[in-house]
Image (spheres, rainbow, N blue to C red):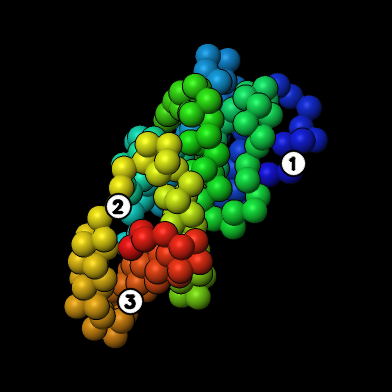
Amino acid sequence: MWVASVAAGEALAFCDADDEVAAGWVSAMGEALSQHDFVAGKREYTKLNEPWTLTYRPLTQVDKLLTSHPPYLPHASSSNLGIKRSVHEAVGGFDETMLKVQDTDYCWRVQLAGIKLHFVPEAVVHYRLRDRLRAIYRQARLAGEYNVLLYKKYKALGMPKLSWKAGLKSWWRILKQSPQIFSQQNRMKWVAHFARRWGRLQGCIKYQVLAL
């Protein structure tokens, strides 16, 4: 998010390049940031996506902030996020060494600095989902891997401990459901779930922490 360094305003609003901000998004973000230091808006999924893509993953940040596993601080996607420049600079901005979930890390660092994250449903972004198998797999695998890094980083800061037994049960469910890969209707969902778990396993090895 290096563009924040060249922005001229005192309030920063983030969205993704492949999404579309709804009418009134800028004014809603501006109004919210006149009252709060850190805000997140609503994501809308139907405008930019085919109906089948709405089934392979949870549709999040629609009516509330995101939650993590295991439950820790709330967070939000950088596809619809706003913050005061002074706060952004105080926490050092986004950690761009992280290829995924850098927005979760950012939200947690800001909140650990004492700044509350507020949900603003009036600020709407039309969010675009992946619609190709390779892209869905890569996104989910990276999310799994970097969530392990988040766990390693924040477990010393109060993030609850993960159960390895629950992780093994998740693997068992995925393996039992593997025939879904032959179903056109369920293939994308199964691949996304498998890729996330595979990414977590790779993250455990890479970051030397048990977080199945």
**Type of amino acid at the residue the image marks with label 3:** Arg
Residue 187 visible to the viewer: yes
- At mark 2, the secondary structure is loop
Residue under label 2, please give it.
Answer: 162
Eyeballing the image, is 154 above or below 204? above
Counting residues from the start of the chain, the first of labels 2 and 3 encountered is: 2
Asked which quadrant contains residue 73, the reply is: top left
| Label 1: few (<14), some (14–19) or many (≥20) C-alpha neighbours in 10 Å | few
Counting residues from the start of the chain, the first of labels 2 and 1 encountered is: 1
What residue do we see at 80% from left, 35% from top? 6
Residue under label 1, please give it.
Answer: 3
Q: Which mark is residue 187?
A: 3
**Type of amino acid at the residue the image marks with label 2:** Leu
- At mark 1, the secondary structure is helix
* Residue 35, position as x, y percentages in the image: 53, 14
> Contact (CB < 8 A) between labels 2 and 1?
no
- At mark 3, the secondary structure is helix
* Residue 70, position as x, y percentages in the image: 31, 47
